[in-house]
Image: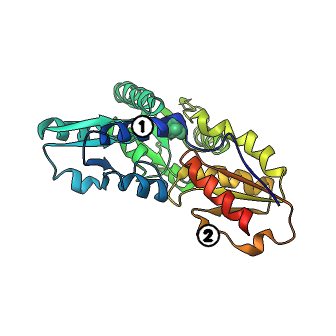
């Protein structure tokens, strides 16, 4: 059986930067707190935990003082920075530059919309850390749209500016903006496709990659948003695509009678994990 790992899968620069900052700090510190999981990959989190990285919740963060806390690539709302400044918390800020730029754009738009009686709309998952960070730039005034049922939250008589969470699908964002426009044909709507190309550029590549193999094994964390998007791409191109998070998820019957297997993953999937999974497939 031939097993090939996709050379374009694996960490994006935002995640690499966050992990690099954590490792650099832990080279001289015994403990570093990470506000939320540093990456949506349970096994990578476990690996870093063994070097001293402790994942904390927001509730735990707001009880801390006099320590170092890492802000992951997803970014944080202003309230996190304000609390840190008042409580002698040194922030190791690993907010991805792409997210940072988006936060600034959302903040500027919110100020403009406030003066024009308009609305800021963000397409994304309510409760996702990046969305919490973005909504925080608008004094929590932004409307988050997760599904088409949420469209009723938008007032069609007022101007609208739309942004997207960086890891959403380009096609779904396009559909959403068309729906907003059709809800208010004469209304003013400005759409900013702020999807990160580190994710969307992988779509055409994965479409081709997935068709080259009898079976595709997609490696991703259960809580990773971009893993869901990219796995769907593989599944649409190759029905025999399977989502796994660890070598233990592999099932021998997936490989019975087949000759080629492609292993790929998300922007939050470590290279070492794809290699470990490819090795386990080789042994089947
Ligand atoms: S997917 Fe894009 S926005 Fe998100 S961390 Fe990676 S580079 Fe940054």
Per the image, label 2 sits on a secondary structure element best described as helix
Name the side, left or right, on which 103 lies relative to 248. Answer: left
Residue position for label 2: 249
Which quadrant of the structure image shows residue 142? Answer: top left
Q: Give percent across and percent down for residue 246.
A: 57, 64
Q: Give percent across and percent down for residue 148.
A: 57, 53
Which quadrant of the structure image shows residue 89? Answer: top left
Placement of 17 over or under 273, stated as above or below: above
Which quadrant of the structure image shows residue 183? Answer: top right
Per the image, label 1 sits on a secondary structure element best described as helix
> Which residue occupies the foreground of this view, 87 or 258?
258
N-term mark: 2 or 1: 1
Q: Give percent across and percent down for residue 121.
A: 47, 39
Q: Is residue 84 visible?
A: yes
Placement of 89 over or under 115, stated as above or below: below
Residue position for label 1: 20
> Which residue occupies the foreground of this view, 165 or 258?
258
> Which residue occupies the foreground of this view, 41 or 4?
4
Name the side, left or right, on which 182 lies relative to 14. Answer: right
Q: Determine crowd level at label 2: few under 14, some 14-19, many 20+ residues with C-alpha closer than 10 A.
A: few
Q: Determine crowd level at label 1: few under 14, some 14-19, many 20+ residues with C-alpha closer than 10 A.
A: few
* Numbered label attached to residue 255: none
Q: Is residue 140 visible?
A: no
Name the side, left or right, on which 90 lies relative to 200. Answer: left
- Which quadrant is the N terminus positioned in? bottom right
Q: Residue at x 40, y 32 (%)?
A: 103
């Amino acid at each position: 059986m031939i097993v090939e790992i996709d050379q374009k899968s694996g960490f994006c620069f935002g995640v690499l930067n966050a992990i690099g900052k954590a490792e650099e700090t832990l080279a001289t510190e015994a403990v570093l707190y990470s506000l939320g999981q540093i990456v949506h990959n349970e096994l990578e989190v476990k690996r870093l935990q063994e070097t001293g990285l402790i994942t904390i919740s927001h509730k735990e963060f707001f009880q801390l003082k006099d320590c170092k806390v890492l802000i992951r690539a997803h970014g944080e709302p202003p309230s996190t920075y304000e609390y840190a400044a008042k409580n002698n918390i040194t922030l190791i800020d690993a907010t991805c530059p792409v997210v940072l730029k988006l936060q600034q754009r959302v903040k500027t738009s919110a100020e403009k919309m406030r003066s024009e009686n308009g609305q800021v709309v963000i397409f994304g998952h309510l409760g996702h850390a990046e969305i919490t960070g973005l909504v925080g730039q608008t004094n929590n005034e932004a409307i988050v749209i997760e599904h088409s049922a949420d469209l009723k939250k938008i007032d069609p008589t007022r101007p609208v500016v739309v942004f997207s969470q960086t890891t959403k699908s380009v096609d779904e964002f396009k559909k959403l903006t068309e729906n907003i426009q059709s809800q208010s044909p004469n209304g003013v709507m400005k759409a900013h496709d702020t999807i990160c190309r580190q994710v969307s550029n992988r779509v055409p590549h994965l479409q081709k990659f997935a068709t080259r193999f009898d079976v595709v094994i997609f490696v991703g964390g259960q809580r990773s948003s971009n893993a869901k998007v990219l796995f769907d791409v593989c599944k649409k191109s190759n029905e025999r695509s399977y989502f796994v998070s660890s070598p233990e998820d592999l099932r021998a019957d997936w490989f019975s009678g087949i000759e080629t297997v492609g292993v790929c993953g998300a922007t939050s999937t470590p290279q070492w994990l794809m290699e470990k999974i490819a090795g386990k497939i080789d042994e089947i």
